Image (cartoon, rainbow, N blue to C red):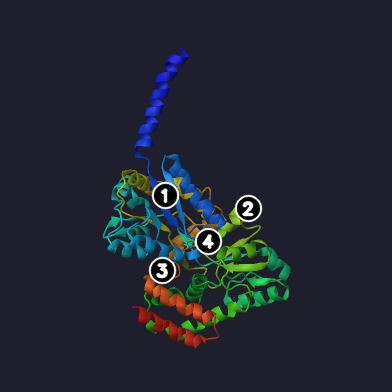
């Protein structure tokens, strides 16, 4: 009797399996630059969810924080007519890929899953090309964070700084006590990450908007910008001699291990603390970069999807787009990554105090016109202008150029790139 019943059940299950998974299974090749400990844990969540639906994930990871190398590799793959299925691309660059006519339209997934109501308009607009969804957002990162090892501060008798004046006093004490005050990674994008936080703190949100978003030469070469370069120069005194070329996650490790007191970095750094099993508020503390408690420099990671011929790949692509905005992925991924969900209406239960502060500050800063796109992380200006800005900041940082010359060069490099 049992065996008789079992057979039809088995057949139905096999049919359901074949129908749901097999018939539509495909492969997605996904280009991304999430290779650090915390990042790899985060992207694995998406791979698992897709595989659970029967699709295959072909990993196309290109190491290099900030994604500059990944973007170069993507260009060459696309130029040779062989782009991956999906690629981590953000901000204004989405429009550039749209102009090339190589992206797939995701409107059907968006409509079926109510993206227009789930996403804040500022986020949705970036994902659309000529009114159609061509990209799917993953998260919201905040750039202007300072990651602190409270034990190092305690041992040095220093107070965690909230202004650049306080920073100087604290850094001197930390240095005297034999620790490295600032864990620093000397790569152009990391220098720019620190620099943009200085600009919004020293100049204020309006100044940031005029300079690093609107690229107005009058404001780029100004006494306030000179001041910003001086603050950047001052930080260098408190870094170690191995900083040049150091990856961002190795700098985070210096804070985790108690070799350094603080790091200025976006909240993907939290992913490293989490992966190392550290407890926020106990083993580490996150504070806004000095002078920036009211501002929020944002960075939204997203995936564009290329037009592919293969039916299975198309299905896998749509499944990936859908899964990314489902609550399950949004929660697990963002907890691991250190970011906050990009969709509205999520439960806050799984998130720690740092993430909760981030969520609250995101809303508060929007009300105060202090919610600003990150230049260093591709959200504010087109790549040519960003490139000019990064080049100027890195050549200033790695030479003895005066702050006045830094500001002058910034304005002329940006003019040249326009
Ligand atoms: C950013 C990206 C983050 C993080 C970081 C370091 O540009 O948005 O998700 O991965 O680079 O790699």
- Does the CB distance between marks 3 and 4 fall below 8 Å? no
Q: Are marks 2 and 3 in contact (CB under 8 Å)?
A: no
Residue 202, percent across and down?
50, 77
Residue occupying image coordinates x 44% and y 73%: 205
Position in image of residue 143 (x %, y %): 49, 66
Q: Which residue is mark 4?
A: 267
* Residue beneath the point at 57% across and 62% down: 249
Q: Give the structural element (helix, strand or loop) at label 4.
A: loop
Q: Report the front residue among 219 and 367.
A: 219
Q: Which mark is residue 369?
A: 3
Q: Nearer the viewer, mark 4 or mark 1?
A: 1
Mark 3 to mark 4 CA distance (whole Å): 21 Å
Q: Mark 3 or mark 1: which comes first in sequence?
A: 1
Residue indicated by mark 1: 324
Residue at the image point whose x is 52% and y is 70% from the top: 190
Among numbered discs 2 and 3, the one appearing first in the sequence = 2
**Quarter location, residue 18:** top left
Is 255 drawn above or below residue 329 in the view shown? Answer: below
- Residues packed near mark 1 inside 10 Å, few (<14), some (14 to 19) or many (20 plus): many
Does the residue at mark 2 contact the one at mark 4 (Cβ under 8 Å)?
no
Which residue in the structure is indicated by mark 2? 277
Mark 2: few, some, or many residues within 10 Å (few <14, many ≥20)?
Answer: few
State the image coordinates of residue 353 (x, y, percent, origin top left). 56, 55
Q: Earlier in the sequence, mark 4 or mark 1?
A: 4
Observer-nearest residue: 394 or 311?
Answer: 311
């Amino acid at each position: 009797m049992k065996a008789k019943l079992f057979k039809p059940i088995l057949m139905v299950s096999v049919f359901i399996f074949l129908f749901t998974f097999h018939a539509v299974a495909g492969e997605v090749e996904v280009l991304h630059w999430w290779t650090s400990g915390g990042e790899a844990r985060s992207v694995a969540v998406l791979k698992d969810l897709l595989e659970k639906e029967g699709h295959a994930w072909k990993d196309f990871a290109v190491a290099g924080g900030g994604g500059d190398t990944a973007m170069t590799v993507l260009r060459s793959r696309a130029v040779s007519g062989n782009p991956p299925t999906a690629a981590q691309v953000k901000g204004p660059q989405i429009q550039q890929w749209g102009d090339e006519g190589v992206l797939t339209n995701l409107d059907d997934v968006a409509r079926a899953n109510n993206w227009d109501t789930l996403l804040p308009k500022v986020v949705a607009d970036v994902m659309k090309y000529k009114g159609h969804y061509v990209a799917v957002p993953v998260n919201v990162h905040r750039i202007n964070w300072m990651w602190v090892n409270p034990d190092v501060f305690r041992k040095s008798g220093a107070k965690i700084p909230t202004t650049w004046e306080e920073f100087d006093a604290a850094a001197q004490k930390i240095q005297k006590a034999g620790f490295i005050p600032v864990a620093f990674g000397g790569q152009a994008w990391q220098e720019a990450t620190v620099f943009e936080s200085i600009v919004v703190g020293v100049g204020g949100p309006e100044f940031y908007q005029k300079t690093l978003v609107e690229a107005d030469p009058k404001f780029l070469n100004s006494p306030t910008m000179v001041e910003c370069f001086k603050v950047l120069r001052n930080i260098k005194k408190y870094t170690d001699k191995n900083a040049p070329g150091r990856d961002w996650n190795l700098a985070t490790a210096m804070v985790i291990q108690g070799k350094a007191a603080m790091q200025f970095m976006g909240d993907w750094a939290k992913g490293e603390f989490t992966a190392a099993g550290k407890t926020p508020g106990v083993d580490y503390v996150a504070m806004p970069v000095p002078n920036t408690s009211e501002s929020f420099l944002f960075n939204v990671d997203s995936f564009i999807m290329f037009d592919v011929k293969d039916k299975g790949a198309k299905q896998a692509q749509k499944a990936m787009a859908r899964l990314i905005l489902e609550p399950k992925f949004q929660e697990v991924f963002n907890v691991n990554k250190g970011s906050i969900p990009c969709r509205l209406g999520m439960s806050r239960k799984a998130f720690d105090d740092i993430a909760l502060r981030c969520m609250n500050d995101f809303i508060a800063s929007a009300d105060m016109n202090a919610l600003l796109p990150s230049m260093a992380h591709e959200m504010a200006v087109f790549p040519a202008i960003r490139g000019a800005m990064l080049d100027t900041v890195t050549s200033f940082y790695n030479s003895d150029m005066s702050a006045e010359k830094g500001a002058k060069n910034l304005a002329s490099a940006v003019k040249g790139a326009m």
